[in-house]
Amino acid sequence: MTSSSPTLSDVASKTGYRARLPDDSGFIDWPEQDNVTWHTLMQRQLGMLEGRVCQEYLDGLERLALPEDRIPQLADIDRVLHAATGWQTAQVPALIPFDTFFELLANRRFPVATFIRTPEELDYLKEPDIFHEIFGHCPMLTNPAFAEFTATYGRLGLAAGPKERVYLARLYWMTVEFGLVDTPAGRRIYGGGIISSPKETLHALSDVPEHLPFDPIEALRTPYRIDILQPLYYVLDELSTLHELSQQDIMGMVHRAMELGLHAPRFKPAPKAAKAKA
Ligand SMILES: [Fe+2]
């Protein structure tokens, strides 16, 4: 680590978690309790995903060969991602500024906060932990269409102004985090926010929420709350739509969405203002 790196006492997250810092070789020595939490989460989600998650995710999961009994080391993830799509992870302490987030994505580096939820917060936590980032997102980053779209999003975000970024964040939310996709086998999950949450996995494919065909301008106009099960999901015809979208004028779509304005929310306001998570 360089002398400018944060020390352990500097890196408490907003919700009080502390990132585990790697040693000089990049290795993180996870405590046993954290490995047990990973094991519990992995086992529970693996049992739920069959028949609910898209094949591209399962292919990525197989390729990553995540250990079940311990938190994986980022270098092992990086080897697989880099060979598949040129992506890598980036170790970060917690939620990071938008600028850093977009810059990392534009450079095909996916930020991973190196802490894991406590057993008391097994079902839900407000901040993305390593289980969400690795188990939820990294398998999809082995897919070229998804990988290209995510990097494009980073490049656009880096060049965007603050208002444009808030719109872009909605597109990310409705795809990378909470996207569904139709497949020959049926409707499936590809969004990491769903994949890392047992409750949302069941909810997303139930008949409770609304499902709408994916339309980028509509997604850009749809407000969301981070702390509730989503009332609405956008469904892709196929995953390659994301690749096609990344070749299109997304900033033009952002400007069109800004002209049209936001849709009325399908939820009650958060008790405290829920901050948009990228
Ligand atoms: Fe995420």
Image (tube, helix red, strand yellow):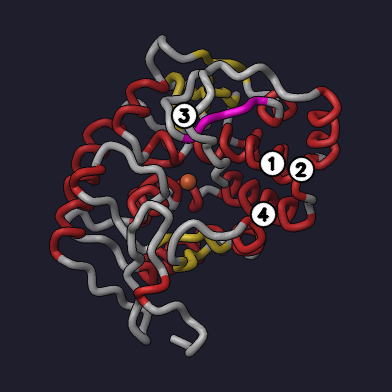
Residue at 22% from the left image edge and 34% from the top image edge: 47
For the residues marked 3 and 4, what is the alpha-carbon distance in whole angstroms?
30 Å
| Secondary element at image label 2 | helix
Q: Counting residues from the N terminus, which is met first, the one under dot 2 or under dot 3?
A: 2
Residue 56, position as x, y percentages in the image: 45, 40
Task: Give neighbour class at mark 1: few <14, some 14-19, many 20+ (Cα, 10 Å).
Answer: some
Query: Residue 224 magenta-drawn?
Result: yes
Q: Nearer the viewer, mark 4 or mark 1?
A: 1
Residue 271 marker: 3
For the residues marked 2 and 3, what is the alpha-carbon distance in whole angstroms?
23 Å
For the residues marked 3 and 1, what is the alpha-carbon distance in whole angstroms?
20 Å
Residue type at mark 2: give it: Lys
Task: Give neighbour class at mark 4: few <14, some 14-19, many 20+ (Cα, 10 Å).
Answer: many
Q: Counting residues from the N terminus, which is met first, the one under dot 2 or under dot 4?
A: 4
Residue 166 marker: 1
Residue type at mark 3: give it: Pro
For the residues marked 2 and 4, what is the alpha-carbon distance in whole angstroms?
15 Å
Disc 4 target residue: 154
In the rendered view, would you say 119 is above or below 25? above
Q: Nearer the viewer, mark 3 or mark 4?
A: 3
- Tell me whether circle 2 and circle 4 mark residues in contact (CB < 8 Å): no
Residue type at mark 4: give it: Gly
Task: Give neighbour class at mark 3: few <14, some 14-19, many 20+ (Cα, 10 Å).
Answer: few
Residue type at mark 1: give it: Val
> Which region shows up in magenta?
222-226
Quarter of the image where one finds residue 31? bottom left
- Tell me whether circle 3 and circle 1 mark residues in contact (CB < 8 Å): no
Residue at 64% from the left image edge and 50% from the top image edge: 148
